[in-house]
Image (tube, rainbow, N blue to C red):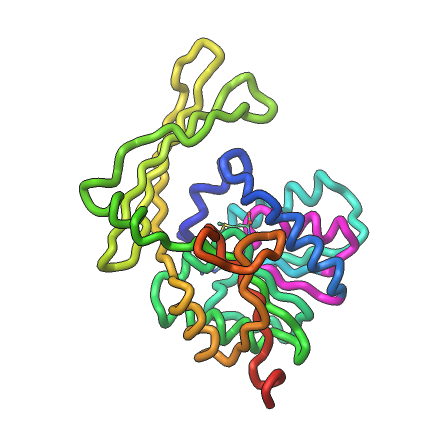
Amino acid sequence: MAVYDRWAEFYDIVHQGLPGEAEFYVGQAVRIGGRTLELGCGTGRIAIPIAMSGGDVTGLDNSGPMLERCRAKLRAVGKTAGALRLVQADMTDFDLGEQFDLIVMPYRTFMHLMTPAAQRRCLETARRHLQRDGVFMLNMWVPKPLQIAAQSGPQGGGLRLAGRYPIPSSADTLVHYCSSTYDEAEQLLIEEHLIHEVDAAGRVRRSVTLPLVRTWVTRREMDNLVRLCGFAVEALFGDFDCRPFGASSTEMLWVLRDGGNLHG
Ligand SMILES: C[S@@+](CC[C@H](N)C(=O)[O-])C[C@H]1O[C@@H](n2cnc3c(N)ncnc32)[C@H](O)[C@@H]1O
């Protein structure tokens, strides 16, 4: 079972992405043109708008239920100006037999690659799927040592209300709680999500608990990883408006090219 299988029915209600993120990736796909590959496309939050904007996009994900949601949304959209092809595969081990002008990995998906070996396999596989002059863009959370120290081990873990959302086509409300803690030694962000479906009278109809464990990567660690895997860093932005990465940035947005082609 893939990590996101049980998330699929709640994903679009709870996860609305980062400000400016979808616009950035869709804009890049339109600007660059050609073929785009999205690694970890999920329910198509970004891949579907790319196809609607006329892009030729392949979405890859290892969760069948997430891809099924994506297919249903695509059917609801109807005819798109471009095309979306979906592939169920592991992003650390796939061979699509073609190369792309743009590869994207939005919404901190790289943090799901739990070991350095998996991170390297994913980067190497992505590089093999990149056109000679192609570009690979991905964003991830910036680990903040003070925040991590303050919420590590027993200090973390308090349950907080993360959001309340109307459930589409229903009078019910989805109430989302989350507790998070950090494991500094293992470099893990450990979350437990509690989801209540609440009816109009305030009764809890259903409760679901969804664990989510991710790993974080520091700026220098990522810089080394990508170079080790044959990429050159064209840019590192601190936000989706392409401002330079700096001390106050909360996001790392990496723009990578094939290092051999830049330097060889
Ligand atoms: C944070 S979600 C992002 C989904 C989508 N890109 C978005 O922006 O809404 C991460 C996605 O990556 C997928 N994923 C995680 N690990 C994966 C792996 N090893 N191979 C393929 N997909 C994976 C999950 O199933 C999930 O759909």
Q: In front here: 84 or 234?
A: 234
**Residue 199 appears in the rendering:** yes
255 left or right of 212 in image: right
Q: In front here: 98 or 132?
A: 132
Q: In this view, does 105 lie above or below 132?
A: above
Q: Residue at x 60, y 49 (%)?
A: 21
90 left or right of 135 in image: left
Residue 137's quadrant in the figure?
A: bottom right
Relative image position of residue 7 (x, y in whole percent): 45, 41
Q: Residue at x 75, y 61 (%)?
A: 31
**Residue 109 appears in the rendering:** no
Q: In this view, does 121 lie above or below 17?
A: below
220 left or right of 55 in image: left
Residue furthest out toward the front: 247
Relative image position of residue 145 (x, y in whole percent): 31, 53
Give the extent of the magenta segment. Answer: 34-56
Q: Residue at x 25, y 59 (%)?
A: 186
Which quadrant: the C terminus?
A: bottom right
Residue furthest out toward the bottom: 264
Q: In front here: 185 or 56?
A: 185
Residue 82's quadrant in the figure?
A: bottom right
Relative image position of residue 4 (x, y in whole percent): 44, 48
Q: Is residue 55 magenta?
A: yes
Relative image position of residue 131 (x, y in whole percent): 66, 76
Q: In front here: 201 or 215?
A: 215
Residue furthest out toward the top: 201
Q: Does the magenta stretch include residue 246?
A: no
Q: In this view, does 111 lie above or below 128?
A: above
